[in-house]
Image (cartoon, coloured by chain):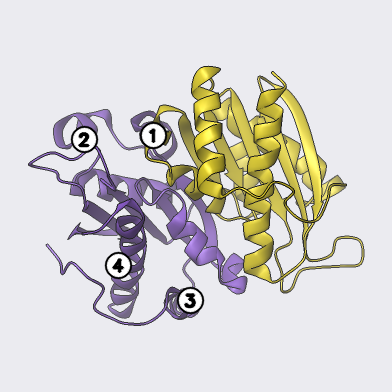
Chain colours: A purple, B yellow
Amino acid sequence: MCEVSPSIVISNETLVSIIVRSLIDKRLSIACAESCTGGLLTAGFVDYPGVSAVLAEGVVAYSNESKIARLGVTKQTLDKYGAVSAQTAAEMASGVAKTASAGVGISTTGIAGPGGGSYEKPVGLVYIGLSVNKRISTKELRLTGDRSAVRNKAVKLAMEFLLQSLKDI
Amino acid sequence: MCEVSPSIVISNETLVSIIVRSLIDKRLSIACAESCTGGLLTAGFVDYPGVSAVLAEGVVAYSNESKIARLGVTKQTLDKYGAVSAQTAAEMASGVAKTASAGVGISTTGIAGPGGGSYEKPVGLVYIGLSVNKRISTKELRLTGDRSAVRNKAVKLAMEFLLQSLKDI
């Protein structure tokens, strides 16, 4: 489990510009698969005018059917672990990287609220999935705040997770 | 060509809640295909907690390859009219409606700037495509402002175009 709040106080715009330059340096393209963030992560990348050099595509797979059809998430994974799980996040990230022929796939799946939470999976639980050159990693977040706050924090932490992972390769 | 500025002064949140209720009433699901808005339109819908009842999926098809592979836009259309054209917007909207099995498909394609504009297709030129029960319509927008302003105005006007179209059926 990771820290609840963003640890690096830099703007999304700065984060994205650093990420895009890093992706260009490493000759990697990127594709996004979003559930709870619903397009905000991809939109964050598209804020950066030069993003067309690296952005392959984004998919907002809000329903399970879309996760299966568009991203290749297996029904078995959804049945066994649920849509909000590290396993589903991992398959979303690897799935979008594969279908978009991108070096990097990044995904979000979580419970943004206000409804939909349970004792085991409360509102604010979000998983980030990352596939970098087919190496998969995931991160569990426990976020606080309203629907908008949860989604915006998830976007920022997903970007930070990606940036950290790019430093390691 | 339409007016440059939004004509109805209501918030995106209110617009979305009216649209979602209208879609539920008419038993229609919706799918989004975005280029220049890059996820902001889908994210605008996902702001509304009850959207899962109607939102099938969103696709950010930023590259031509993605428009062809994910949305079924034809290479002939892209070659003849360009990615930023009413024809491409129409194919994006009908394509995403078809692949997502949704009653409504809505698309955006345009030049958000700051670069990428030309005399014929200046920064701020945006096309909205709409497929409602397979009936296709498009709208040309000439928007002013910076990249962020163009994208946000395009989202709002796309929602208004959709709401108006839903009133007609």
Q: Chain of mark 1?
A: B
Marks 2 & 1 on one chain: no
| Cα–Cα gap, marks 2 and 4 | 24 Å
User: Closer to the observer: label 2 or label 1?
Assistant: 1
What residue do we see at 39% from left, 49% from top? Answer: A34
Q: Nearer the viewer, mark 3 or mark 1?
A: 1
Give me the C-alpha separation between circle 1 and circle 4.
25 Å
Q: Chain of mark 2?
A: A
> Which tag, 2 or 4, sits closer to the chain's start?
2
Is there a contact, CB below 8 Å, between mark 2 and mark 4?
no
Horizontal side of residue B14 vs A62, given as left or right: right
Q: Nearer the viewer, residue A33 or A113?
A: A113
Which residue is disc 4 drawn over?
A: A157
The image quadrant that residue B37 belongs to is bottom right
Q: Residue B64: x percent and y percent?
A: 67, 51
Q: On what subunit does the disc labeled 3 rest?
A: A
Circle 3 sits on which residue? A13
Q: Residues within 10 Å of mark 4 (few under 14, many from 20)?
A: many
Residue A116 falls left or right of residue B130: left
Give the vertical position of B144 relative to B19 (above or below): below
Kind of residue indicated by mark 3: Glu
Question: Is there a contact, CB below 8 Å, between mark 2 and mark 3?
Answer: no
Q: Quadrant of the N terminus of chain A?
A: bottom left
Q: Disc 2 marks which residue?
A: A77
Residue at 55% in and 64% down: A46
Q: Image point 25% across, 38% down: which residue?
A: A115
Q: What secondary structure is found at the residue carrying circle 1?
A: helix
